[in-house]
Image (cartoon, rainbow, N blue to C red):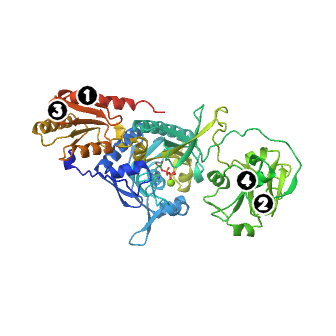
Amino acid sequence: MRYSKSFIYTLKEEQKEATIVSHNLLLRGGFIVKLASGIYNYLPLGLRVIRKVSQIVREEMDRAGAIEILMAAIQPAELWKESGRWHEYGKELLRIKDRGDRDFVFGPTHEEVVTDIVRRYIKGYKQLPINLYQIQTKFRDELRPRFGLMRGREFIMKDAYSFDKDEEGMDVSYDKMREAYNNIFRRCGLNFRSVEADTGSIGGKDSEEFMVLSQTGEDEIVVCDSCDFASNVERATSVVEDEPGEEFELKKVATPAKETIKDVCEFLNADPRYSAKALVYKNDEGDYFCFFVEGDDELNLIKAKRVTGSVELEMVSDEELKNLGLEKGYIGPVNFPNKDVRVICDERITKRNNLVVGANEYGFHLTGAKFGRDFDCEVADLRVVKEGEICPKCGKGRLKKMRGIEVGHIFKLGQKYSKAMNAVFLDENGRAIPFYMGCYGIGIGRTAQAAVEQNHDEYGIIWPISIAPFEIEIVSLDTRNEQLRDYCDDLYNKMLNGGLDVLYDDRDERAGVKLNDMDLIGIPIRVIVGKKSFEDGMAEVSLRRDRKKEQVRLENVIDKVKELRDRLYKELEEVRR
Ligand code: ATP
Ligand code: MG
C-alpha cells in the first residue's frame, strides 16, 4: 500500500485518554480512534492487525477441527430466559427492544444461541463431537471500560463451543482447544502462561486462562519457581505450613479503643498470624456471612463467593452490623452472637493452637482461642495466597506473583446450558442425554493490544511480524530525486508482485517526519532509501526492534528482506519464556 494513498494519520502528542502505553501507541499510530467510552473505530492499520490475529486464530481453530459459523449479534430474550441468564447476567448485558416492544440483547457471548442451533440439528450420538466457532463483535456494558481495546464495551471475540456425548469426550475437546490456544499465542509472538482459573458461578470442572505477562495486566497470577504450577490468584492455594504454636487457656483481656486487629496484636504483643479478623458480608439474596481469616491475610472474595454460592458479596455497613448484634472491631468466633449469620473460618486459623479473637463485647478480646475446643464453624479456603508460600502442586517450590492480561479463556461447561435449555441427543441405548459442552474465548483486540503492551520502546510499537499491519516498510527519503523515486517505485512494485506485504512511504514529507512515523507504527522490517547511500548504490535495511542499519546493495534488497522475514517467522516457532 502506498502511504500517500492510504488513510494513516499519526499523532505527535501523548493521548490523555490513555493510561497504559499500548493504548497510547495505538491511538498515536492511527490504528484506532475512539467513538464513545469503550467503543472504537478500527482504521486501516488497526484493521489489518485485527485481520492478521483473526487469521491465525482461524487457522488454528480449523486445524483443531472446529467449524466456522457466524451467529447473529442480536439475540431474542427468550433464549436468555431459558438458560436463566436473563436475570443472572446483570447490567453488563445490553438489552434492547424492537418496535413491537419485544426484548432482545446484543450478544455478550453465544452459549444460548449455539446451544439452540445444535439442538435443532444434532439428534444422535453419531453426529458428535462437534465444535462450532465464530469471530464476531460482542457487546458488554462494562462497569469500567478502559485501556482501549483491552476492556471495551464493543469488542471482537473468537468464541468456540464444543458438544460431546460424555465427559471423556468433553475432556478431549478441551485438550484440543488448549493446544490450539498455545499455538495461537505463540504464533502471535506473545510471552504468555496458561493458568488455572476460577470457574465462577457456573462451577464447571476445569478452566484455564491464557495470560500475557505484563506489569499493567489487570489479573494477578502466581507461578511456582520450581514446577509448572500457575494459577490465577482468584483460585490459587498454597500448602498450609504446620505452625500450630503453644496451647494456652482461653483468657479475656481488655483492649480498649483498639479496633483494628493490627492495633490489638501490637497492644497484646501478639503475632498477627495468630489472630483472626472478622469480615462481614451480605450477598445478593440477603444472606449474611462472617468470614474469619488470619490477621495479616486478605479475604479472597472470589473464593468467598464460591464457598457461599453467591453471585455478589457486599461488605455490610456499620449500621447493619449493629442491627445484627455484632460489635465492630470486636467480632470473634467464640460464642458468636447471631445464629442467622453463617460463620466460615479460613483453614489456616483452624490449625493454630492459640489465637487472638474478638470477644463480641466492646473493648475486649480473647487470647488462647483454639478451633475445636473453644469454637466450631464451617471451614474453607478463603484467603489470598502470598508470595513465598509453598506450591500446592510440587510441595517444594515457592510461589511468585506476576501480573497478566487475560487474552483467552477455556472452560468445561458440562451440562449447565444443555440441561437448562433441554438440548439433548439420543445415546447408544436410545436415552436422551444433555450435551457435554465446553466454551473457548479469545479477545482478538485485546490480544493485538497485549502484543503492543509487551513489545514497544520509547519510539513506538515493535510488532511481532505475524500480526504487524505490514511486514515490510519502504521509506523513500527524497521523493523529488527522480532516480531515487524510480528505484523505490520499482522496488515496491517488485515486492508487491512477489507477494510481499509492504507499505511504501512515498509521501512528500520531511525525512524526520517519515522516520518518526516509521518507528511509531512499528513495522518489523524497514528499507530506507536516502540520497547519500543511494548514490553509492546502497539502501539501509533494519529491523524495528534494534533499529540497527545495514547497508545493502540496491539489487540485493529484496533477498535481504526475505531473509529477515524468514528469520523473524522462524523465531516465532520457539516458545518464549
Ligand atoms: P474479564 O475477566 O477480563 O472481564 P471475562 O472472563 O469476562 O474477561 P470471557 O467471557 O471469558 O472474559 O471472554 C473471553 C475473552 O474475551 C477474554 O479472555 C478476553 O480476551 C476477551 N474479553 C472479555 N471482555 C472483554 C472486553 N470488555 N474487551 C475486550 N476483550 C474482552
Ligand atoms: Mg468480564
Amino acid on which the number 4 mark rests in the picture? Lys
Q: Earlier in the sequence, mark 2 or mark 3?
A: 2
Spot occupied by residue 376 in the image (x, y as percentages of width and height): 81, 52
Q: To which residue does mark 1 refer?
A: 560
117 sits to left or right of 366: left
Comes first in the chain, label 2 or label 1: 2
In which quadrant is the N terminus drawn? top left
Q: Secondary structure at mark 1?
A: helix
Answer yes or no: do the residues labelled 2 and 3 have beta carbons within 8 Å?
Answer: no
Single out the mark in the foreground, 4 or 2: 4
Q: How many marks?
A: 4
Asked whether residue 64 appears in the rendered view, the answer is no
Mark 2 highlights which residue? 330
Vertically, is 542 above or below 156?
above
Q: Which of the two labelled residues, at mark 4 and mark 2, occupies the earlier sequence position?
A: 4
The residue sitting at 40% across, 40% down in the picture is: 455
Give the percent coordinates (x, y) of residue 293: 72, 51
Which circle's residue, 3 or 4, is located before the other in the chain? 4
Under circle 4, the secondary element is helix
Q: Tag 2: residue type? A: Tyr
The verdict on label 2 being within 8 Å of ligand 1 is no
As rendered, which of 311 and 553 lies closer to the eye? 553
The disc at residue 534 is 3
- The residue carrying pointer 2 sits among few (fewer than 14), some (14 to 19) or many (20 or more) residues within 10 Å by Cα, namely many
Q: In the rendering, which numbered label is found on residue 262?
A: 4
How much space separates mark 4 and mark 2, taking CA atoms?
Answer: 13 Å
Q: Nearer the viewer, residue 54 or 495?
A: 495
Name the residue type under label 3.
Answer: Phe
Residue 314: percent from left, percent from top: 63, 62
Q: Is residue 297 visible?
A: yes
